[in-house]
Image (cartoon, grey):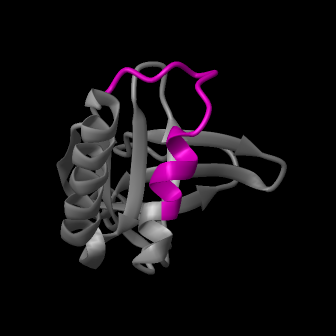
Amino acid sequence: MRPEWKPGRFVFTTVSHAVPAGVTPLVMVAEAEGLTLVVRQEDAEAAGLGYDYVAGWLVLQVNSALEAVGLTAAVAQELARAGISCNVVAGFHHDHLFVPYEAADRALELLRGLSRRTAAEVAR
């Protein structure tokens, strides 16, 4: 999986119509209630956008197929056992995980351990 922690603090916020000037979303999801945006915390604050959840951004550097079965479940299960919430966004090339910022170090450690265990099992 080769998980990597991207620098910065990221937040989930919502706007009713358009992305405010000066805000560059990492993720944008159109919902009936408005646009959900994942943005840098400092961008949200500069634009006056509210948020409740501050996340660390972890990227799984494995090229996972969108139709692959089990990777998201294995990651979620590993983090859930440690009491770490995880919001997953599947990109075309990689999976992106948003975990509580204060737990990002621990999540990275857990995912590296999972990766090592999985590689050892495959090698057998």
Whether residue 87 is in magenta: the answer is no
Note whether residue 47 is visible: yes
Q: Residue at x 68, y 45 (%)?
A: 17
Range of magenta residues: 62-77
Horizontally, residue 81 falls left or right of residue 123, namely right
Q: Quadrant of residue 82?
A: bottom left
Q: Is residue 59 above or below residue 93?
A: below
Q: Residue at x 62, y 55 (%)?
A: 15
The percent position of residue 36, horizontal first and vertical second, equals 61, 52
Q: How many numbered circles does the render carry?
A: 0
The percent position of residue 101, horizontal first and vertical second, equals 29, 71
The N terminus: image quadrant: top left
Note whether residue 19 is visible: no
Horizontally, residue 48 falls left or right of residue 118, namely right
Foreground of the two, 24 or 113 = 113
Whether residue 68 is in magenta: the answer is yes
Q: Residue at x 32, y 27 (%)?
A: 62
Foreground of the two, 76 or 114 = 114
The percent position of residue 26, horizontal first and vertical second, equals 40, 40
Q: Is residue 117 above or below residue 93?
A: below
The percent position of residue 61, horizontal first and vertical second, equals 27, 31
Foreground of the two, 124 or 35 = 124
The C terminus: image quadrant: top left
Residue at the far right in the pictured view: 32
Q: Residue at x 46, y 75 (%)?
A: 81
Residue at the far front in the pictured view: 124
Horizontally, residue 37 falls left or right of residue 4, namely right
Horizontally, residue 122 falls left or right of residue 19, namely left
